Image (spheres, rainbow, N blue to C red):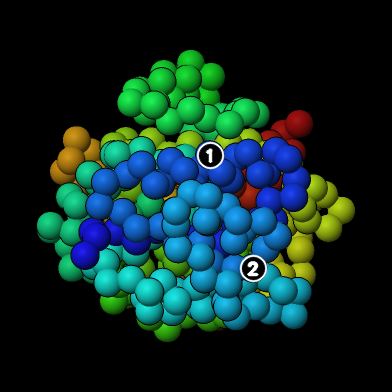
Amino acid sequence: MTLLTLFSSPKPFTDPHINIIQRNAIESWTHLNDVKVILIGDEEGEAEVARDLGVLHIPNVDVNEKRTPLISSMLDLAREHSDSPLLGIVNADILLMDDITVASQSCARVADKFVLLGQRWDLDITHPMKFGADWQSHLEEKVRREGELHLPKGSDYFIFPRGCYTNIPNFAIGRAGWDNWFIYKARAEKWDVIDATQDVMIVHQNHDYRHLAGGEIHYNAPETKKNTEMAGGVAETRYTIVDSNFQLRDGKILRPRPTSGRFWRGIELFLRKIFFFLPEDKRENVVRPQRWAKKIRKFFN
């Protein structure tokens, strides 16, 4: 029995750059200790890549009307085909290193119900990686030199005990909203939401969005709108890494350090409770402090 099963639903491997970065990412997972890897879906080239890299491929995932895999079905299949105590859903362009398994072990030792997540580092990678004995140290050096830490918006991985997220809406993978809802759900259930940014370096390989309609990012896509509706509305899809109630620092699970982002987020959540009776669009204008600041700046300018 492996500690952790990582599963993902990659994009088609038809675009040369997407092919390179997804192969890089998935191969990095295969070099982790005590980890099983599952690719879920039936995109072009997926079965061949799974065979090349020696990972399990499950093609029969439930999809929506756009043929986009559903996260609920992905979770069911991951549980069915794995006995790992921990599951991890991860985007197929994310490079992982040994610190992810160390962090997972640390959390599993002290928490029964938790979700582990963290900010990513963005990095330009255009060529197939070589996974020699020191590939991780070389990657870390390159990230420190050339990478950029992404804002704590959106999440590229979630690691959690297999008993979590057993009943979720039929979110479309790769569209906005579901990752925010994962954080909202964990907070609502009073699980530990653990930000591992300080201890875990995950690396996002930059890419464009040619695989989507119009080549534009998915924030305004119809599937994103549907994800938001299934999540329960805008408030539930506003949760980000800032809403974590713990941090992993030097292997210890601690209360998060105060930041201005956490302060203003706390104000927003407090105001949401007070103005719960307002329609959603009006409540948004009232409860978000960032909008006040913009209006004040506009007034004085």
| Residue 262 visible in the snapshot | no
Q: Position of residue 180 (x, y in %)?
A: 51, 62
Count of marks overlaid on the render = 2
Compare residues 272 and 131 and report the one nearer the observer. 131
Can you say whether 58 is above or below 292 in the image? below
Q: Residues within 10 Å of mark 1 (few under 14, many from 20)?
A: many
Relative horizontal placement of residue 231, taking residue 16 as reference (left or right):
left
Residue 145 rendering spot, x and y as whole percentages: 48, 16
C-alpha distance separating marks 2 and 1: 19 Å
Q: Which residue type does callout 1 highlight?
A: Asn
Residue position for label 1: 24
> What residue is shown at x 58% (from left), y 36% (from top)?
205
| Label 2 packing within 10 angstroms: few (<14), some (14-19), many (20+) | some
Quadrant for the N terminus in the image: bottom left
Q: Which mark is residue 42?
A: 2
Q: Residue at x 87, y 53 (%)?
A: 214
